[in-house]
Amino acid sequence: LAPINPLYTQTVAFSHYNHIAAQLPIDAKSNKMVTGGTHDQARQCLENIKAIVESIDHVMDDIVKINIQVKDMADLAAIDDVYSTFFTGELPARTVVGVNDIAQGAMVQIDAVVSNGEGTPPQK
């Protein structure tokens, strides 16, 4: 499971969607920030999201929207390198925002919206 924070809920269901709280690159087993650069931190954020998604009986391909906050936009290629490995179908809509600071000194944090499948399938 993803790391638990007593100040917020990991996911909230509303209407046809589950909103997943922004995930920091914290390993749930050690409860420590992952080191090794933006690539490794992005992977941990996505692993945390995957754990939450699976805990509500969904898969990563049910994600319809991803928001990525990154401290250095030059690191976007490293994030992209790991990002697509988490999806097997169509990639979700995505927003990337460069920010000045992220909690606990992280280089990246990611949040997501999961479709519960009752709506209209995505159209191109």
Image (cartoon, helix red, strand yellow):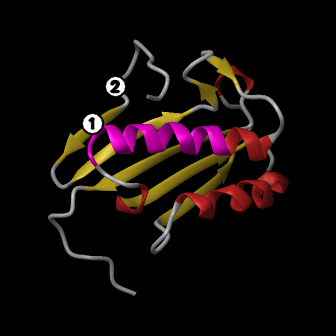
For image coordinates 44% across by 28% down, the residue present is 1
Image coordinates for residue 118, horizontal then vertical, percent: 14, 64
Does residue 41 sit above or below 104 in this rendering? below
Crowd rating for badge 2 (residues with CA inside 10 Å; few <14, some 14–19, many 20+): few
Please tell me which residue is depicted at 70% across the width and 61% down the height of the picture.
80
Q: Report the residue at 21% width, 63% height from top.
A: 117
User: Disc 2 marks which amino acid?
Assistant: Thr
Q: Position of residue 48 (x, y in %)?
A: 51, 36
Do labels 2 and 1 touch, CB within 8 Å?
yes
The answer to which quarter of the image holds residue 44 is top right
State the mark number for residue 40. Answer: none
Q: Which mark is residue 12?
A: 1
Question: Can residue 51 be seen from the camera position used here?
Answer: yes
Q: Name the residue under label 2.
A: 9
Residue 64 percent coordinates (x, y): 38, 62
- Residue 6 vs 62, above or below: the answer is above
| Span shown in magenta | 43-57
Does the stretch in magenta take in 79? no
Give the residue at the far bottom of this rendering. Answer: 124
- Main SS, magenta region, reads helix
Q: Quadrant of the C terminus?
A: bottom left
Query: In the figure, residue 77 lies in which quadrant?
Result: bottom right
41 lies left or right of 12: right
Camera sees residue 71:
no
Whole-angstrom CA distance, mark 2 to mark 1, is 7 Å
**Front one among 43 and 79:** 43
State whether residue 95 is above or below residue 122: above
Residue drawn at x 46%, y 66% as measured from the top left: 92
Secondary structure of the residue carrying numbered label 2: loop
Horizontal and vertical percent for residue 63? 39, 58
Q: What residue type is labelled 1?
A: Val
45 inside magenta stretch: yes
